[in-house]
């Protein structure tokens, strides 16, 4: 039986490229069942198609890949995940693996590795792009400490990361409250907690932080 795969990336060209490579290289044992343009759509399509594996871009509008993988893992742990990213810093790799990803592919070489990664992860193994494997090894050898530039990112709650992304995408507290079905005061409280945890005092700096850390894109 073919491995049923969902691809989530906000760039249609990337989705098309991955589909082409997969269908050309693995026509018999891998089937693309759906494509999503953001994390929220990916969640809905996982519910609908129940794929064996999700290939998820790390930075997408509405809901980023890290948060989407966390939610998929909570509701459908049988759907394994591979993170797709342009980032090769250890903080991104560690957060993806902590969120539940079983693989991590750097976009620069993803087309070369995607089929092997899908097969390995579906078989219960893990897969990292060869160019970033040293990141995990170096982190293990050094004791797994927090990167100097990681700041308080690892201490943010799932809801705080979600609100941080929406702030960076330009939504007001009222807009965010409607989107998340909470009160504007709740959103303002989370905004204050974000600034305290990250030691950030201006909203423009919150936006810069979110973009730098791959939580949101401009």
Image (tube, grey):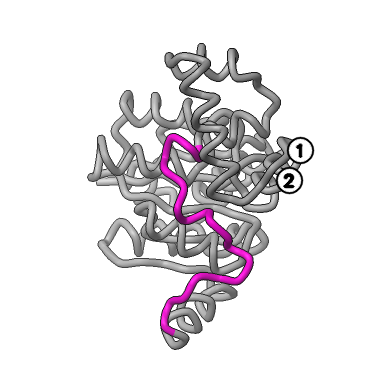
Mark 1 and 2 residues: CB-CB less than 8 Å, in contact?
Answer: yes
The image's mark for residue 139 is: none
**Prevailing SS of the magenta stretch:** loop
Residue lying at the far bottom of the rendered structure: 141
Q: Residue at x 42, y 60 (%)?
A: 103
Residue name at image x 35 percent, y 64 percent: 120
- On whether residue 110 falls in the magenta region, the answer is no
Q: Point out which mark residue 204 bears.
A: 1
Q: What residue is shown with label 2?
A: 208
Q: Would you call the spot at circle 2 few (<14 residues within 10 Å), some (14-19), or many (20 or more)?
A: some
x and y percentages locating residue 67 in the rendered image: 44, 41
Whether 111 is drawn above or below 8: the answer is below
Tag nearer the camera, 1 or 2: 1
Residue 182 appears left or right of 208: left
Q: Residues within 10 Å of mark 1 (few under 14, many from 20)?
A: few
Residue 145 drawn in magenta: yes
Tell me the magenta residue range: 143-161
Of 126 and 22, which appears nearest the observer? 126
Q: CA distance from mark 1 to mark 2?
A: 6 Å
SS at circle 2: helix
Left or right: residue 74 compared with residue 85: left
Residue 161: x %, y % from top left: 50, 40
User: In the structure shown, which secondary structural element does the residue marked by tag 1 occupy?
Assistant: helix
Q: Position of residue 176 (x, y in %)?
A: 55, 19
Residue 87 falls in image quadrant: bottom right
Quarter of the image with the C terminus in it:
top right
Q: Is residue 162 left or right of residue 167?
A: left
For the point 43% across and 48% down, the residue is 27
Q: Residue at x 55, y 25 (%)?
A: 188
Instruction: Please identify the quarter of the rendering in which residue 46 is found.
Output: top left
Q: Nearer the viewer, residue 14 or 160?
A: 160
């Amino acid at each position: 039986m073919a491995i049923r795969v969902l691809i989530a990336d906000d760039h249609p060209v990337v989705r098309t490229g991955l589909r082409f490579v997969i269908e050309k290289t693995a026509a018999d044992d891998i089937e693309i069942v759906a494509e999503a343009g953001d994390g929220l759509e990916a969640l809905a399509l996982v519910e609908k198609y129940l794929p064996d594996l999700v290939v998820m871009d790390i930075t997408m509008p509405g809901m980023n890949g890290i948060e989407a993988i966390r939610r998929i893992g909570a509701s459908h742990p049988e759907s394994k995940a591979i993170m797709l990213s342009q980032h090769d810093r250890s903080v991104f790799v560690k957060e993806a693996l902590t969120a539940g990803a079983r693989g991590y592919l750097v976009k620069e070489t993803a087309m070369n590795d995607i089929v092997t990664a899908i097969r390995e992860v579906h078989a219960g193994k893990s897969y990292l792009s060869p160019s970033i494997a040293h990141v995990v090894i170096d982190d293990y050898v050094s004791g797994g400490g927090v990167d100097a530039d990681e700041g308080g990112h690892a201490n943010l709650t799932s809801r705080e990361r979600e609100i941080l992304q929406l702030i960076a995408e330009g939504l007001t507290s009222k807009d965010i409250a409607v989107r998340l079905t909470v009160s504007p005061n709740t959103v303002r409280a989370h905004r204050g907690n974000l600034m305290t945890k990250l030691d950030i005092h201006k909203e423009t700096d919150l936006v810069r932080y979110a973009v730098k850390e791959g939580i949101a894109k401009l």
